[in-house]
Image: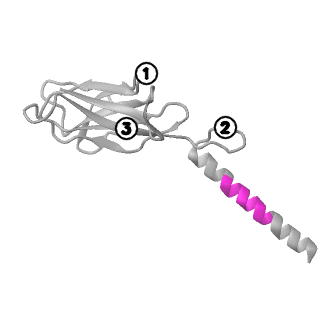
Protein backbone atom coordinates (compact mmCIF):
# COMPACT_ATOMS: atom_id res chain seq x y z
CA UNK A 1 0.00 0.00 0.00
CA UNK A 2 1.17 3.58 -0.55
CA UNK A 3 0.48 6.83 1.24
CA UNK A 4 0.93 9.74 -1.14
CA UNK A 5 1.09 13.44 -0.43
CA UNK A 6 0.32 16.15 -2.96
CA UNK A 7 1.92 19.49 -2.07
CA UNK A 8 0.09 22.22 -4.00
CA UNK A 9 -0.29 25.97 -4.13
CA UNK A 10 -3.41 26.88 -2.13
CA UNK A 11 -4.09 29.82 -4.50
CA UNK A 12 -3.74 27.57 -7.59
CA UNK A 13 -4.82 24.06 -6.48
CA UNK A 14 -3.66 22.32 -9.66
CA UNK A 15 -0.08 23.59 -9.27
CA UNK A 16 2.22 21.15 -7.47
CA UNK A 17 5.13 22.49 -5.40
CA UNK A 18 8.49 20.72 -5.42
CA UNK A 19 11.01 20.79 -2.59
CA UNK A 20 8.76 20.55 0.49
CA UNK A 21 10.18 18.10 3.02
CA UNK A 22 7.82 15.97 5.09
CA UNK A 23 8.05 13.44 7.90
CA UNK A 24 5.76 10.41 7.77
CA UNK A 25 4.69 9.17 11.20
CA UNK A 26 2.88 5.96 12.06
CA UNK A 27 0.22 6.27 14.76
CA UNK A 28 1.34 4.01 17.60
CA UNK A 29 4.61 2.12 17.45
CA UNK A 30 6.49 1.08 14.33
CA UNK A 31 5.00 -1.90 12.50
CA UNK A 32 6.57 -5.29 13.36
CA UNK A 33 9.80 -5.84 11.48
CA UNK A 34 10.31 -2.17 10.54
CA UNK A 35 13.13 0.04 11.79
CA UNK A 36 12.55 3.75 11.28
CA UNK A 37 15.26 6.31 10.57
CA UNK A 38 17.16 7.96 13.40
CA UNK A 39 15.13 10.91 14.67
CA UNK A 40 17.10 14.15 14.17
CA UNK A 41 17.44 16.34 17.28
CA UNK A 42 15.46 19.15 15.61
CA UNK A 43 12.44 16.98 14.72
CA UNK A 44 9.54 16.77 17.18
CA UNK A 45 7.73 13.44 16.97
CA UNK A 46 4.07 13.80 18.05
CA UNK A 47 2.97 11.89 21.15
CA UNK A 48 1.95 8.26 20.53
CA UNK A 49 3.60 8.21 17.08
CA UNK A 50 6.88 6.98 15.60
CA UNK A 51 8.92 8.37 12.71
CA UNK A 52 8.59 6.04 9.72
CA UNK A 53 10.25 8.01 6.89
CA UNK A 54 11.26 11.44 5.60
CA UNK A 55 10.71 12.58 2.00
CA UNK A 56 10.76 15.60 -0.32
CA UNK A 57 8.06 16.49 -2.84
CA UNK A 58 9.12 15.89 -6.46
CA UNK A 59 8.85 18.30 -9.41
CA UNK A 60 5.09 17.72 -9.60
CA UNK A 61 4.58 18.20 -5.84
CA UNK A 62 4.12 14.49 -5.00
CA UNK A 63 5.63 12.34 -2.24
CA UNK A 64 5.07 8.59 -2.11
CA UNK A 65 5.71 6.23 0.80
CA UNK A 66 5.24 2.46 0.75
CA UNK A 67 3.63 1.40 4.02
CA UNK A 68 2.25 -1.79 5.56
CA UNK A 69 -1.50 -2.19 6.06
CA UNK A 70 -3.22 -2.05 9.44
CA UNK A 71 -1.96 1.37 10.58
CA UNK A 72 -2.91 5.05 10.50
CA UNK A 73 -0.36 7.53 9.09
CA UNK A 74 0.34 11.25 9.53
CA UNK A 75 2.45 13.71 7.51
CA UNK A 76 4.02 16.87 8.94
CA UNK A 77 5.99 19.42 6.94
CA UNK A 78 9.60 19.72 8.09
CA UNK A 79 10.57 22.67 5.88
CA UNK A 80 8.82 24.71 3.23
CA UNK A 81 10.34 25.50 -0.16
CA UNK A 82 11.71 29.06 -0.64
CA UNK A 83 8.91 31.61 -0.92
CA UNK A 84 6.38 29.56 1.04
CA UNK A 85 5.24 29.38 4.66
CA UNK A 86 5.75 26.13 6.60
CA UNK A 87 2.54 24.19 7.13
CA UNK A 88 2.22 23.52 10.87
CA UNK A 89 -0.66 21.04 10.50
CA UNK A 90 -0.57 17.29 10.96
CA UNK A 91 -2.33 15.52 8.05
CA UNK A 92 -3.53 12.01 8.92
CA UNK A 93 -5.29 8.99 7.47
CA UNK A 94 -7.59 6.55 9.18
CA UNK A 95 -6.31 3.02 9.81
CA UNK A 96 -5.63 1.58 6.36
CA UNK A 97 -6.73 -2.02 5.77
CA UNK A 98 -6.15 -3.45 2.31
CA UNK A 99 -9.45 -5.31 2.38
CA UNK A 100 -11.50 -2.10 2.64
CA UNK A 101 -9.21 0.62 1.28
CA UNK A 102 -7.70 1.41 -2.11
CA UNK A 103 -4.05 0.50 -2.70
CA UNK A 104 -3.02 4.18 -2.56
CA UNK A 105 -4.27 6.98 -0.31
CA UNK A 106 -3.48 10.60 -1.21
CA UNK A 107 -3.25 13.37 1.38
CA UNK A 108 -3.79 16.96 0.16
CA UNK A 109 -1.05 19.26 1.45
CA UNK A 110 -1.88 22.92 0.63
CA UNK A 111 0.96 25.46 0.70
CA UNK A 112 0.60 29.20 1.22
CA UNK A 113 2.96 31.69 -0.41
CA UNK A 114 4.66 34.25 1.80
CA UNK A 115 3.11 37.75 1.59
CA UNK A 116 4.71 40.23 -0.79
CA UNK A 117 5.38 43.91 -0.14
CA UNK A 118 3.12 45.89 -2.46
CA UNK A 119 5.72 48.30 -3.88
CA UNK A 120 8.81 46.09 -4.12
CA UNK A 121 7.38 42.63 -4.71
CA UNK A 122 9.89 41.39 -2.11
CA UNK A 123 8.74 38.32 -0.17
CA UNK A 124 8.86 38.52 3.62
CA UNK A 125 8.11 35.98 6.32
CA UNK A 126 4.76 36.75 7.93
CA UNK A 127 6.40 37.72 11.26
CA UNK A 128 8.69 40.25 9.53
CA UNK A 129 5.75 41.74 7.63
CA UNK A 130 3.81 42.18 10.88
CA UNK A 131 6.82 43.84 12.57
CA UNK A 132 7.07 46.32 9.68
CA UNK A 133 3.36 47.13 9.92
CA UNK A 134 3.49 47.64 13.71
CA UNK A 135 6.70 49.73 13.47
CA UNK A 136 5.24 51.88 10.69
CA UNK A 137 2.05 52.46 12.64
CA UNK A 138 4.05 53.44 15.75
CA UNK A 139 6.22 55.89 13.79
CA UNK A 140 3.13 57.43 12.21
CA UNK A 141 1.51 57.94 15.62
CA UNK A 142 4.72 59.48 17.04
CA UNK A 143 4.91 61.85 14.06
CA UNK A 144 1.31 62.98 14.64
CA UNK A 145 2.02 63.62 18.33
CA UNK A 146 5.09 65.74 17.45
CA UNK A 147 3.05 67.84 14.98
CA UNK A 148 0.33 68.44 17.59
CA UNK A 149 2.92 69.44 20.24
CA UNK A 150 4.76 71.90 17.97
CA UNK A 151 1.52 73.34 16.55
CA UNK A 152 -0.12 73.93 19.93
Q: Magenta segment, which residues?
A: 133-142
In the picture provided, is 19 more to the left or to the right than 146?
A: left
Question: Which residue matches tag 1?
Answer: 59
Magenta span contains residue 16: no
Magenta span contains residue 139: yes
Q: Position of residue 47 (x, y in %)?
A: 27, 45
Question: Which residue matches tag 3?
Answer: 109
- Point 77% across, 59% down: residue: 139
Q: Position of residue 136 (x, y in %)?
A: 73, 56
Q: Describe the element under mark 1 as helix, strand or loop.
A: loop
Q: Nearer the viewer, residue 60 or 70?
A: 60
Circle on res. 122? 2
Q: Are marks 1 and 2 in contact (CB under 8 Å)?
A: no
- Point 56% across, 41% down: residue: 114
Q: Position of residue 48 (x, y in %)?
A: 23, 44
Q: Crowdedness of circle 1 by 10 Å Cα count: few (<14), some, many (20+)?
A: few
Q: Describe the element under mark 2 as helix, strand or loop.
A: loop
Task: Tell me where residue 91 sits by quadrant.
Answer: top left
- Point 72% across, 43% down: residue: 119
**On screen, residue 37 above or below 112:** above
Q: Are marks 1 and 3 in contact (CB under 8 Å)?
A: no
Real-space CA distance between mark 3 and mark 2, rounded to the nearest whole angstrom: 25 Å
Label whose residue precedes the other's in the sequence (3 or 2): 3
Real-space CA distance between mark 1 and mark 3, rounded to the nearest whole angstrom: 15 Å
Amino acid sequence: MTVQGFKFNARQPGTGIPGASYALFVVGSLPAGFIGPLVPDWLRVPADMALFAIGISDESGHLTFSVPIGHAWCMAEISAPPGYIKDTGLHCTAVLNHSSDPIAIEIALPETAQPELAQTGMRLPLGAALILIVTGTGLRQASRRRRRTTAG
